[in-house]
Image (cartoon, grey):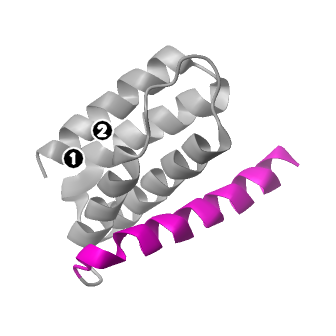
Amino acid sequence: MALLVGLVLGAGGLGAVWAYSANGYLGDTAQADAAASCNALALVGTIDEDFDKATMLRMNGAHVLAQAAVEKDKYYQSLLKATEDAEYARATGDVAVFNTAVAKAKDLCADL
């Protein structure tokens, strides 16, 4: 059941991120996917205790878009790794690791 909920939330998050990033449309490129991932990450704040639904959706969307970027260009592998670390931390409830991974992903975005 949790997997199904996660997939539904993830699909919704991905749709929201694509809609959000449409203003800076870069075409069907790895750069566009990485930029959309970074846009979603910009909306993910620091977590103190609990993961709210919006944070979960935004983080999932950022992760899925980083995966799409890597499918087209391995250059974005470090962004994918940081979002994977954040997603794993979110799934296990590790707030400190989540915040560290999100900060690292945002730093990587600043360099893209």
Q: Tags 1 and 2 in contact by the CB under 8 Å rule? A: yes
Residue 30 point in image, percent of width and height: 26, 70
Say whether residue 111 is left or right of residue 43: left
As shown in the figure, which amino acid type bears the numbered disc 1?
Cys
Give the CA distance from mark 1 to mark 2. Answer: 6 Å
Residue 19 point in image, percent of width and height: 45, 74
Residue 79 point in image, percent of width and height: 29, 46
Residue topped by disc 1: 109
Crowd around label 2: few <14 · some 14–19 · many ≥20 (10 Å): many
Say whether residue 32 is left or right of residue 67: left
Crowd around label 1: few <14 · some 14–19 · many ≥20 (10 Å): some
As shown in the figure, which amino acid type bears the numbered disc 2?
Ala
SS category of the residue bearing label 2? helix
Say whether residue 110 is left or right of residue 27: left
Q: Residue at x 58, y 31 (%)?
A: 90
Q: Residue at x 44, y 26 (%)?
A: 46
**Is residue 9 located in the magenta-colored stretch of the structure?**
yes
Seen as rendered, the residue at the extreme right is 1
Can you tell which mark lies on residue 105? Answer: 2
- Up-down relation of residue 27 to residue 85 (above or below): below
SS category of the residue bearing label 1? helix
Seen as rendered, the residue at the extreme left is 111
Picture quadrant where residue 44 is located:
top left
Pick the residue in front: 96 or 79. 96
- Up-down relation of residue 25 to residue 38 (above or below): below
User: Which residues are the magenta region?
Assistant: 1-26
Q: Residue at x 38, y 33 (%)?
A: 102
Magenta: predominant secondary structure element? helix
- Up-down relation of residue 30 to residue 91 (above or below): below
Seen as rendered, the residue at the extreme bottom is 27
Residue 77 point in image, percent of width and height: 28, 49
Q: Residue at x 25, y 84 (%)?
A: 27
